[in-house]
Image (cartoon, helix red, strand yellow):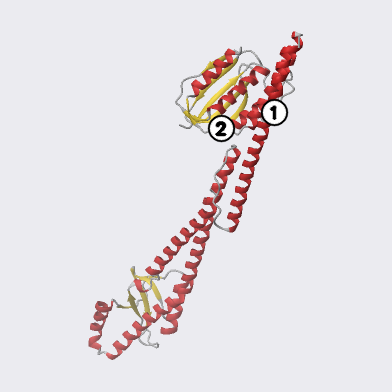
């Protein structure tokens, strides 16, 4: 079966139309057999009766001339029937059965029909000049008179009806599938965290109601996202102001160096948590895609990370500019590097590669790694692996942020085992130029 709804619906409608047309043609053939057989029998019987009357009325010496006249003008031949004649019967069908029955009623039970006699094709009908006469003759008519064919105009109209029905079937199927395709594209847009264009609210009542409900849902999601961003922005602003005062107070008022550093560290951790909440709640779709030199972007990220004391081993070959959201990609790569530094430490590898369809950004570490059974769970918000990486603190939003950014670009995030030990986080993005 085809995969698309349009193709499946059209295929089913086309099968229905063809079966209906075939049934109609079969019914026409069945109902047309009897009147056609009656018409052909009447034609043959009229020819036989005309020959009988002509022969009886003509003088004996002129009968051979009549035979020649029938053959030249009407295409009718008369031959004497011989016992040694090689007779080929007419095909077995309802039409020829009815034809034989009609001729028997009109010319007598001794009447025979044949498709050929002694290898000569035609419409052969046997008759006797008199019912009491034992001598039998063959009347040979053109084969076309016994050949039952559809009239050309019937075939033309039938073909036109099939083409018209298939066209209407395609129109019906496309009018059903087109709004569903548009809704599927809009749903994918919502799934990537973007705002879809409103669907047209027209067509059949069911599709109109469905489009209206989807537009309402998309508008509600957009409003909720905007309100959430406003609330979190207000909370961030309200929290960062007292945190800044607390940090200033700690640096000025706490005389114990160790206690002061502990208070400052706690405040920095709180600010980091607030930043991660804001990153997760931020509407990434607000940043439009732009042509970006991804190698240069990743090189700047690696330089900044090395500047803060992390050892980043970068392999960043030059690539053609691609269309993406540079701030979102930078945030995703920074989160992967922060995750590797927090849970593994040591050297971190940053690698860029590409093929004809996708670009791959890989961040690898040499830590304890992640069990395969925990990979999908770690991509969910507020989730951390407590078994192998329990010594670090965090909100559990880093990988969830990267996952959202990957879906925003119609890409994917994969967590794999590093061949050299540790975790390899691969961010795969489609190539768009």
Report the disc number at residue 214.
none
- Res 371 seen here: no
- Res 263 seen here: yes
Residue 121 in percent (x, y) is at: 34, 69
Left or right: 73, with 370 as reference point: left
Which SS class for mark 2? loop
Count of numbered circles on the image: 2
Say which quarter of the image contains residue 163: bottom left
Give 227 or 404, whichever is nearer the viewer.
Answer: 227
Say which quarter of the image contains residue 398: top right
Residue under pointer 2: 411
Q: Earlier in the sequence, mark 1 or mark 2?
A: 1
Report the disc number at residue 238.
1
Left or right: 204, with 40 as reference point: right
| 176 to 83, vertically: above or below | above
Residue at the location (54% across, 20% down)?
351
């Amino acid at each position: 079966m085809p995969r698309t709804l349009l193709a499946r619906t059209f295929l089913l409608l086309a099968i229905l139309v063809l079966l209906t047309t075939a049934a109609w043609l079969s019914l026409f053939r069945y109902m047309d057999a009897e009147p056609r057989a009656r018409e052909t029998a009447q034609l043959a019987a009229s020819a036989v009766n005309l020959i009988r009357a002509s022969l009886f009325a003509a003088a004996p010496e002129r009968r051979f001339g009549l035979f020649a006249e029938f053959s030249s003008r009407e295409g009718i031949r008369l031959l004497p029937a011989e016992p040694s004649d090689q007779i080929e019967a007419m095909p077995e069908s309802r039409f020829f059965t009815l034809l034989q029955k009609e001729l028997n009623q009109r010319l007598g039970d001794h009447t025979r029909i044949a498709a050929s006699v002694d290898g000569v094709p035609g419409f052969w009908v046997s008759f006797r000049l008199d019912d009491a006469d034992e001598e039998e003759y063959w009347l040979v008519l053109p084969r076309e008179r016994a050949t039952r064919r559809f009239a050309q105009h019937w075939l033309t109209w039938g073909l036109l009806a099939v083409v018209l029905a298939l066209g209407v079937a395609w129109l019906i199927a496309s009018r059903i599938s087109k709004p569903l395709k548009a809704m599927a594209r809009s749903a994918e847009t919502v799934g990537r965290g973007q705002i879809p264009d409103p669907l047209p609210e027209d067509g059949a009542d069911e599709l109109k109601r469905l489009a209206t409900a989807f537009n309402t849902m998309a508008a509600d999601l957009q409003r909720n996202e905007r309100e959430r961003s406003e609330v979190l922005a207000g909370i961030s602003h309200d929290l960062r102001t007292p945190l800044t005062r607390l940090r200033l107070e700690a640096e000025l008022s706490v005389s114990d160096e160790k206690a002061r550093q502990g208070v400052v560290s706690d405040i920095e951790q709180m600010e980091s948590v607030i930043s991660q909440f804001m990153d997760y709640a931020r509407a990434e779709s607000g940043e439009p895609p732009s042509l970006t030199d991804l190698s240069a972007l990743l090189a700047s990220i690696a330089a900044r990370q090395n500047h803060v004391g992390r050892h980043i081993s970068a392999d960043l070959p030059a690539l053609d500019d691609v269309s993406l959201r540079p701030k979102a990609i930078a945030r995703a790569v920074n989160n992967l590097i922060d995750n590797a530094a927090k849970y593994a430490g040591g050297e971190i590898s940053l690698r860029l590669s590409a093929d004809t369809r996708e670009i791959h950004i890989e961040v690898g570490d040499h830590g304890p790694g992640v069990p395969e059974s925990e990979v999908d769970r770690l991509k969910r918000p507020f989730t951390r692996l407590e078994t192998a990486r329990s010594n670090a603190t965090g909100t559990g939003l880093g990988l969830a942020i990267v996952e959202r950014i990957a879906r925003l670009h119609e890409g994917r995030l994969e967590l794999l085992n590093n061949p050299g030990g540790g975790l390899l986080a691969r961010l795969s993005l489609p190539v768009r130029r």
